[in-house]
């Protein structure tokens, strides 16, 4: 069975690139907007979420924290995609994010980050 991954990113080109890379690695991918993921993710229980650091004025780290509070998503791998600014990476330290991946990245890197986040959560669970 293919693992489900939700991608939350307001930049269509980046969202498509991530979707293409993850589908190529064998994942079932659903892209969604900030508000939709809050409703759709808990009942669907994705194996991982890939969330942009900046979601059109909203924080991807805050979204991860909010989603992590849902019992259905407590063991879901969470990957944040950020630009290369060091200040963005500092926001991830001590958060509920499993992996922070910097832009730009190769398609294989996003698949590896998702796989690592899923494994990390399995070990913690």
Image (cartoon, rainbow, N blue to C red):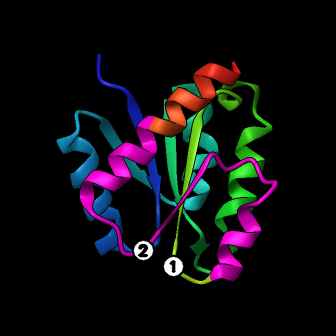
Magenta residue check for 104:
yes
State left or right for residue 81 relative to residue 97: left
State left or right for residue 1 relative to residue 54: left
* Residue behind mark 2: 103
Q: Earlier in the sequence, mark 2 or mark 1?
A: 1
Q: Quadrant of residue 22?
A: top left
* Residue behind mark 1: 83
Residue drawn at x 66%, y 31% is: 73
Q: Nearer the viewer, residue 90 or 10?
A: 90
Magenta stretch, residue numbers: 86-115
State left or right for residue 25 relative to residue 92: left
The percent position of residue 32, horizontal first and vertical second, equals 45, 54
Vertical order, 10 against 78 (above or below): below
* Dot 2 and dot 1 residues touching (CB under 8 Å): yes
From where the camera sits, is residue 57 visible?
no
Q: CA distance from mark 2 to mark 1?
A: 5 Å
Vertical order, 95 against 87 (above or below): above
Magenta residue check for 109:
yes
Residue drawn at x 77%, y 49% is: 66
Q: Nearer the viewer, residue 56 or 21?
A: 21
From where the camera sits, is residue 1 visible?
yes
The percent position of residue 123, horizontal first and vertical second, equals 63, 21
Vertical order, 17 against 66 (above or below): below
In what element is the residue under mark 1? loop
């Amino acid at each position: 069975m293919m693992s489900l991954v939700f991608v939350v990113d307001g930049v269509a080109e980046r969202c498509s690139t991530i979707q293409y890379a993850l589908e190529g690695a064998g994942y079932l991918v659903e892209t969604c907007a900030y508000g939709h993921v809050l409703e759709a993710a808990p009942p669907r229980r994705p194996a991982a979420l890939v969330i942009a650091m900046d979601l059109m004025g909203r924080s991807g780290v805050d979204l991860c924290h909010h989603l992590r509070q849902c019992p259905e998503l407590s063991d879901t791998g969470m990957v944040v995609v950020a630009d290369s600014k060091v200040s963005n990476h500092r926001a991830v330290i001590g958060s509920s994010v499993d992996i922070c991946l910097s832009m730009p990245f190769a398609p294989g890197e996003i698949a590896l980050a998702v796989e690592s986040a899923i494994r990390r959560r399995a070990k913690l669970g």
